[in-house]
Every structure is written in structure tokens, then in C-alpha cells.
Image: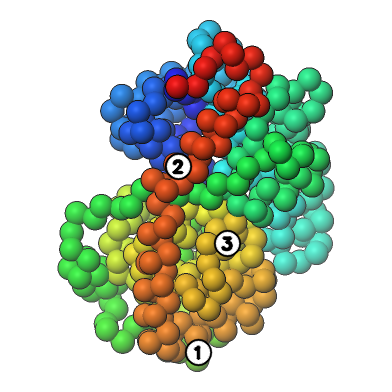
Amino acid sequence: MKIALNIEWVGARRGGAEKYAGIIARALGEAGHEVHLFARGVDVKELADGITVHPVAVRKWPGCGWFHAYQFASASERALKKEDFDLVIGFNKTWYQDVYLAVAGAQPAVVEHSLKRFECPWRRAFHRLGKMFSPKQWMFKLIEWKQFRGNARPMHVIAPSHFVARQFHEHYNLPRSRVSIVHNGILPPCPTRGAEDARTDFRAAQGFDDSHVALLFLARNYHLKGLEPLLRSFVVTSREHPQARLVVCGGRHQAEFQKMADKLGVAERVRFLGFVDDVHQVFQGCDAFVLPTFYDPCSLVVPEAMHYGLPVVTTAQNGAAEMLTPGREGFVVSEAWNLGELAAALGQLCGDDGLRKRMGAEARRRAERVTMQARLRELTEVLEQFGRNERPNSSSRQAA
């Protein structure tokens, strides 16, 4: 098939959805499809050869950054209409598409869950009020209206989890026939160094010895992904298990959390690494992965951690939790602010080497079934079925 992918940015530096767009583009190209990518910016190092990139220019107006998402969606629509494609796949905040790959979730749910990162009800109410008067949120609502309301172009939604699928049913009243579920998959990493050497070097650089248990937190948005409740829970964990260490990386803005760790009295046991270009060594040097997120449609970093044999602790607000059997590959806590539940899960992993290793082995076995190759087969089935049976005017663009 001749397939167009429509997303504003592509690349791991921009976030999970942007990283996944590159993975999908590569996988579709390797499967023999003709892939065209319409984007405002692309990290070409993350793309395979043979993918055609169509730059979509957005005029920058001073002080109007909130308008860029709408500008891109409109400009990409004009660009896409100039060519004929068998299928147009959009990712987030675009409206001209046949299939909407909802890796960023449903916008109303994103807003609602992100507000829960404020533990204080008054702060939460204040930020909710700010959202109501935010021009950026107005633009998101307008894009949402063009996607699902009014004279919206009919499209099929592919949700990355049952968690997200329920949100599309609830917020947009979409019939089940218009929503499919395909969990995110990963391309198995190809480390350039042996696992033991990488682990030894990383732990030596961080001052860890064999007795230390390193818990890894990897995310771009530390606020949304739950670093504050993790640090507060880690106070209890480190007191009960002095061998526990916490490794924090992925984000560029960490000063606030470094001060928080110092105030909580755990700064000496927390390593802040900032953004890391090559995370293979970090995964290989740690013993468990923790992501107490407030909202994640289906976090890619969870199956990545599992691939490295790390047991996972995450929340029920992460679609990737559906990949776990609690107590087998890790633990799923009810919510990020349940600090007691979170600390208990961390304590079990830190205090029982045998349990941690058994869970890590189960996690690695489970990760072998969630590769991009397996997910691509599921995704292709949905795309081909949509192309044959549901897509308007499909007779003029036959699926290959």
C-alpha cells in the first residue's frame, strides 16, 4: 500500500508518540509498503532508508506558539490532498486521516488525568481553571471538534490499550465498530556492548556495588510521569532498604526534583542523569523499572524495560499495565498518590533478590511477545480490513 503518516514531529527527543511514529514508519517500510511521512520536523536518524519525508512548514508568529498545532494540522491537510494514498494514518492533533493511531490518548482524558498530579485539591482546581482559559486548550478543542464532531471525516481509531479505547467510547460516543485495540510494540534494542560490561561500567560510574539495588525511572515529563510521588515513596523504601538507589533520567528540567530529593533527605541515594542519548547502558545497569505515571496511553518504555529483564512497577493509569500480570512481571499500583502501595511494591523488589530475578525473567519472556513485528501483524490486519470494508470511496484506492 501507499501509506501516508501525519504527525507534527518525529523522534524520541520529542516524546513517546513521536518516537512511536518513527517506529511505525520503519516497520511499515520494512514490510514492503511505500511510506510517506508528513511532518514539521523529523529526526531522520530514526528512520529507515526508503521513507519519503514531506516537510510541512508552519509560519511562526511571535507569542502564538499555542496556534502551531492547528497550523500544522491545516497545512498537512492541504499537502496530503495534493497526492493520492491508499491510506492516511494520523497520530495526534490532526484531522485529515483515514485511521487515527491514538498513541497520545484521548485529549479530554489527558487533561483530566494530568491534573491529578497536583495532590492539593486547591492547586488542582487552580490549574483546571487555567486550562479553561488557555488558548492552547481552545485550539486542542477545535482540533478535536474537527476530528470527531460536525462534518468530521469518517475515520477508524486504533487505541493502544483497552484503557484508551474506553476513553474514546466515553468522550466521543464512538461505536465499538470504529475502535480497534493494538498495543504498542517495540523494535528490540541492539546494544553495541555486552550486557555484563555495560552493567559493570554504568554501576561503577554511579558508585554502585553489587549490594545496591538500582531502581530506574525514565521519562521526559517528570511531572506527569510521577517523579514526585516516587521520590516521596522512596523515602520509605530507602529507610527500610538502605541498599536501594534511584536512577532518574530522560528529562532536561530536573533542578526542581533535585531540590525535592535534598529536602526529603534522599539526595545521596538518587542519581539524576538528565537526558541520555543512549539508554542501553542505563537499562543494563539497573535492577528494576518504576513509572508511577498519572496518565500514559501505553508507555513504550515499559516493554523496553521488560526486554532488558527488569521487573516493572507502574500504575493502573498506564495502558502498558495491561501487558503485566501483577505479581509475575512486576506490580500495578492503583494510583500514583497511593504512596504506601508504591513503597510496598518497591520494598518487595529491593528486599527479595530471588523475587526480583524471577520477575525479571518473566518480564523478558513477556517482552518477546510484544515486539513491533508481532504488533505490525495485528496493525496490518486492522488497516487491511478497514481498507477493504469501511473506508469511504475505497474502490478508487484499492489496498495492495
Q: Residues within 10 Å of mark 1 (few under 14, many from 20)?
A: few
Q: Position of residue 322 (x, y in %)?
A: 58, 61
Instruction: Determine whether 175 is above or below 351 in the image.
Output: above
Measuring 66% from the left and 55% from the top, which residue is drawn there? 163
Label 1 sits on a secondary structure element that is helix
Which of the two labelled residues, at mark 2 and mark 3, occupies the earlier sequence position? 3
Residue 252 visible, this angle:
no
Q: Amino acid at mark 3?
A: Glu
- Secondary element type, mark 3: helix
Quadrant showing the N terminus: top left
Q: Which residue is mark 1?
A: 239
Relative vertical location of residue 29 with respect to residue 191 in this rendering, above or below: above
The label number, if any, that marks residue 1 in the structure image: none
Name the residue tied to disc 2: 377
Distance, label 1 to label 2, CA atoms, is 47 Å
Of mark 3 and mark 1, the one earlier in the sequence is 1
Q: Secondary structure at mark 2?
A: helix
Amino acid at the residue labelled 2 = Arg
User: What residue sits right under mark 3 in the picture?
Assistant: 322
Discs 1/2, front: 2
Task: Say which label, 1 or 2, has the lower sequence index.
Answer: 1
